[in-house]
Image (tube, coloured by chain):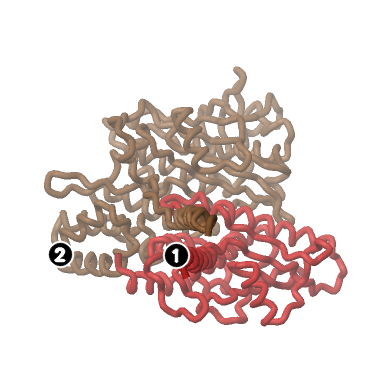
Chain colours: A red, B brown
């Protein structure tokens, strides 16, 4: 084989590996199934409206994350690209989750997702509540698999709804950024600067949300724990 | 392989470009690093607050009237004298301005630019939106980083060591304040299409006009203000947004304004009111207010460590919090070098140096001193 061909194929391999690595780091899409309704009063219009509002305020908060000061430029670009996307069926309708765990993993990988939100709308003492489950795919998180975020769909929980979901998204970004994905249990200190920035960003909404919703305490503690690990293992 | 080499070049260009896109590490410009300003900071003739009409897709009237109320609330925090202000102290002038045009989807950057253009040192802006069955006011505070505000804020806290001064970056330049949930009574008052009524006198129900934005306030009472608008003098009884007298966000704007005017005891008073308010103060907001109160206490020659330690206990990953705690420890060390202070500073440096900005002058000084 001629030298130029060897160089050509060698470059192809390097480009492919680097691109894959770049793609793995640039996870900026969060997918959301339509939440299942567990109401018996058939008032779907109200439930649709509340769910739409719920999605809107989370999207607004995610958009604001890129405006945070003192963030490294490449991380800022990723934050600008953060998007909450509805999972639609072939008819273009927002679909409810009917996937198995294996299928969820496939979806997560195929779409290069940061995370997937799934959940239910239930009634609690006459008040609508959103119960969110988070699927982190191959990210090595320290939360329990059955973590559920319970939030009343009332005006008093406006901030907590925004904070809780943005904290989870930032936590997922942090895991991806420092390489805690797949089989890797070691922190990749080459991205420690972005990791530290994400810890600083994530801890604020996490601690705010944990003050008003006990279901966010594990998320706050997980971010704190990762921050401490970064501090120990990636001394600057 | 005639085109093989061309492909190699083409793919190499693609590869280099994609690597650059993911590995760019431009040094960010920090809001706190006012060192980018080369002009000598000018202490302004007056300190100005800028209150924007709140934007809203759905409830423009409510956004406008709510902002008018917050305008009066922030203005009510202005003072030139007080029992705790020495009679020979001149606090200078204070002004509250009104920005009549809300900006849809405003950012802190835009708010800062507009504040600078209007010669203001602090801006309050936000949105009014429906959520669930209620109405939410979402407010933001922006303190622009330019020569004027830099001049004001740089007159703030710094640590003296040797012959040098080490400034500590102002902690609250871009703040998202906790949502104000409006009750039904307030919503009804804010829905008035012509604006908030101006009454003939404090108790009267005779309307002589409507407040639609900027008015000149003559005096304040709890939940009310005597104003002059279009040549007519009357009373506004403003809706109880975020509290009967004043919302915490208005108190925060007022406290920062008082700091800028050198009225540290007045600022401490407002910050303490915020911390002790019975409403749901978000922890992130409380941390900002604690840092600010700690700075004011230090500027009075006392120790702000209690507030800095509180902030650090709740968020040990924030560069601003770490800097302030180290600053408090350095300040304490300057007054009297104690073994406990040294020990604490070394522990903080050990635990948190990773989260300290490597260019932090205070961080470098603390590492040297302790």
Tell me, yes or no, if residue A193 can be seen here: yes
Mark 2 belongs to which subunit?
B
Q: Which residue lies at the image location 58% right of the left edge and 28% below the top edge?
A: B214
Q: Which residue lies at the image location 74% right of the left edge and 62% below the top edge?
A: A51
Observer-nearest of B333 and B227? B333
Residues at discs 2 and 1 both on one chain: no
Position of A133 relative to B176 (above/below): below
Observer-nearest of B216 and B23? B23
With A100 as the anchor, is B273 left or right in this view? left
Between tags 2 and 1, which lies in front? 1
How many marks are shown on the rendered structure? 2
Position of B98 relative to B129 (above/below): above
Q: Position of residue B52 (x, y in %)?
A: 57, 36
Q: Residue B125 lies in what quarter of the image? A: top right
Q: Residue B53 lies in what quarter of the image? A: top right
Q: Quadrant of the C terminus of chain B?
A: bottom left
Q: Position of residue B142 (x, y in %)?
A: 47, 42
Q: Position of residue B40 (x, y in %)?
A: 28, 30
Tell me, yes or no, if residue B277 can be seen here: no
Q: Position of residue B194 (x, y in %)?
A: 72, 30
With B174 as the anchor, is B230 left or right in this view? right
Q: Residues within 10 Å of mark 1 (few under 14, many from 20)?
A: few
SS label for mark 2? loop
Q: Residues within 10 Å of mark 2 (few under 14, many from 20)?
A: few
Observer-nearest of A174 and A49? A174
Q: Residue B367 lies in what quarter of the image? A: bottom left
Mark 1 belongs to which subunit?
A
Residue found at the far top of this picture: B231
Q: Which residue lies at the image location 60% right of the left edge and 30% below the top edge?
A: B100
Residue found at the far right of this picture: A42
Q: Please give the label number shown on residue B338.
A: 2
Task: Name the residue carrying label 1.
Answer: A7
């Amino acid at each position: 084989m001629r030298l130029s061909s060897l160089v050509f194929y060698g470059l192809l391999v390097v480009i492919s590996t680097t691109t894959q690595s770049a793609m793995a780091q640039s996870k900026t899409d969060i997918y959301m199934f339509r939440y299942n309704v567990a109401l018996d009063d058939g008032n779907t219009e109200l439930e649709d409206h509340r769910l739409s509002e719920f999605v809107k305020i989370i999207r607004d908060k995610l958009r604001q994350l890129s405006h945070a000061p003192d963030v490294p430029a490449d991380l800022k670009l990723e934050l600008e690209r953060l998007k909450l996307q509805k999972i639609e069926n072939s008819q273009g309708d927002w679909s409810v989750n009917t996937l198995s765990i294996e299928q969820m993993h496939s979806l997560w990988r195929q779409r290069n997702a940061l995370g997937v939100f799934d959940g239910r709308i239930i009634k609690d003492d006459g008040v609508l509540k959103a119960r969110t489950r988070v699927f982190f795919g191959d990210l090595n998180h320290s939360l329990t698999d059955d973590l559920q975020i319970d939030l009343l769909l009332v005006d008093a929980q406006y901030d907590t709804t925004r904070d809780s979901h943005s904290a989870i998204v930032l936590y997922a970004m942090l895991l991806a950024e420092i390489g805690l994905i797949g089989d890797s249990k070691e922190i990749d200190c080459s991205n420690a600067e972005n990791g530290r920035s994400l810890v600083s960003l994530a801890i604020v909404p996490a601690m705010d949300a944990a003050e008003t919703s006990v279901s966010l305490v594990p998320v706050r503690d997980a971010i704190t724990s990762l921050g401490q690990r970064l501090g120990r293992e990636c001394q600057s | 392989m005639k085109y093989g080499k061309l492909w190699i070049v083409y793919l190499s260009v693609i590869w280099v470009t994609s690597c650059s896109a993911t590995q760019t590490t431009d040094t960010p410009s920090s809001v706190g690093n006012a060192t980018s300003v080369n002009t000598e900071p000018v202490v302004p003739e007056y300190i100005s607050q800028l209150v924007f009409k709140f934007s809203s897709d759905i409830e423009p009237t409510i956004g406008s009237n709510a902002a008018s109320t917050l305008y009066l609330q922030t203005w009510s925090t202005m003072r030139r004298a007080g029992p705790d202000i020495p009679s020979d102290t001149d606090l200078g002038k204070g002004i509250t301005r009104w920005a009549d045009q809300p900006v849809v989807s405003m950012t802190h950057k835009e708010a800062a630019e507009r504040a600078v253009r209007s010669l203001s040192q602090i801006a309050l802006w936000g949105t009014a939106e429906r959520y669930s069955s209620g109405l939410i006011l979402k407010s933001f505070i922006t303190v622009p980083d330019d020569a004027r505000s830099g001049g004001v804020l740089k007159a703030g806290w710094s640590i003296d060591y040797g012959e040098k001064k080490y400034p500590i970056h102002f902690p609250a330049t871009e703040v998202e304040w906790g949502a104000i949930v409006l009750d039904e009574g307030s919503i009804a008052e804010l829905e008035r299409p012509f604006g908030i009524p101006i009454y003939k006198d404090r108790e009267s129900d005779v309307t002589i006009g409507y407040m639609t934005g900027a008015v000149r306030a003559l005096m304040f009472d709890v939940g009310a203000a005597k104003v002059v608008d279009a040549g007519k003098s009357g009373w506004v009884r403003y809706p109880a947004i975020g509290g009967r007298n004043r919302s915490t966000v208005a108190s925060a704007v007022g406290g920062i304004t008082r700091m800028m005017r050198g009225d540290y005891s007045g600022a401490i008073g407002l910050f303490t009111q915020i911390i002790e308010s019975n409403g749901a103060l978000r922890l992130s907001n409380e941390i900002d207010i604690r840092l600010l109160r700690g700075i004011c206490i230090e500027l009075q020659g006392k120790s702000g460590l209690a507030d800095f330690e509180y902030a650090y206990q709740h968020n040990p990953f924030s560069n601003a919090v770490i800097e302030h705690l180290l600053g408090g420890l350095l300040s304490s060390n300057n007054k009297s070098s104690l073994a406990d202070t040294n020990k604490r500073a070394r522990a903080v440096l050990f635990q948190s140096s990773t989260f300290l900005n490597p260019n932090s002058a205070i961080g470098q000084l603390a590492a040297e001193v302790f």
